Image (tube, helix red, strand yellow):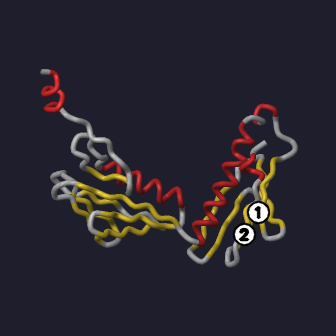
Amino acid sequence: MSRVGKKLILIPAGVKVEIKGQDVSVAGPKGQLGFKVPDGVIAEIKDGSLSFSLESKIEKRRLKKIPALWGLARNHIANLIEGVVNGYQKALEFEGLGYRAQIENGDLVLWVGFSHPLRVKKAEGIEFSVEKNVIRISGIDKSLVGQTAAKIRKLRPPDAYKAKGIRYFGEVIKKKAGKKATTATTK
């Protein structure tokens, strides 16, 4: 049995949760999101809280997969509720000579050592902001915010020798010694 799946989700004031079959929609002050609960998992609203349970009749071949999806569905909907109330934010920092970023028409434009600027299109529900060498990505969908941050980091991952590139805010990069340090110590 899933310990995570058994936990109740308290529905905060100002948040409206609707369940239509397997579709769950969450509306709050920041927006509206939806999720399709996997087959075999049942979502119910009781006394201002959301609970999840398993179907009583599950085929033997699907028996192993359903409990894993039970906790997944519960956490995903908990993230949706948190997103429509508070929102999510990820920060990236970039470091390198001549590296810069700016916002143009809502899109993020990066100059990160290539011969041309890189343009990251703004997805629906995502906002970019730039302060000095920090890029902030914010939105109500946790998975979309994280996916966008990973996509931007992948454009110029941090270098292990000079620590140049785009990294998550606060990420520590272990620098490698390089050729000069290894040849000097062998003599």
Above or below: residue 152 compared with residue 89: above
Picture residue at 38% right of the left edge, 68% below the top: 128
Picture residue at 66% right of the left edge, 59% below the top: 77
- The answer to whether 23 appears left or right of 54 in the picture is left
- The answer to whether 96 appears left or right of 17 in the picture is left
Q: What residue type is labelled 2?
A: Ile
What is the C-alpha distance between the residues marked 1 and 2? 7 Å
Nearest the eye: 41 or 49: 49
Residue 104, how many percent across, how many down?
28, 71
Number of labels in the image equals 2
Picture residue at 28% right of the left edge, 57% below the top: 94
Q: Which amino acid does label 1 sit on?
A: Leu
Disc assigned to residue 11: 2
In the displayed orientation, state which residue is furthest to the right.
Answer: 56
Cβ atoms under marks 1 and 2 closer than 8 Å:
yes
Nearest the eye: 100 or 106: 100
Q: Looking at the figure, which quarter contains the N terminus?
A: top right
Q: Name the residue under label 1.
A: 50
- The answer to whether 178 appears left or right of 77 in the picture is left
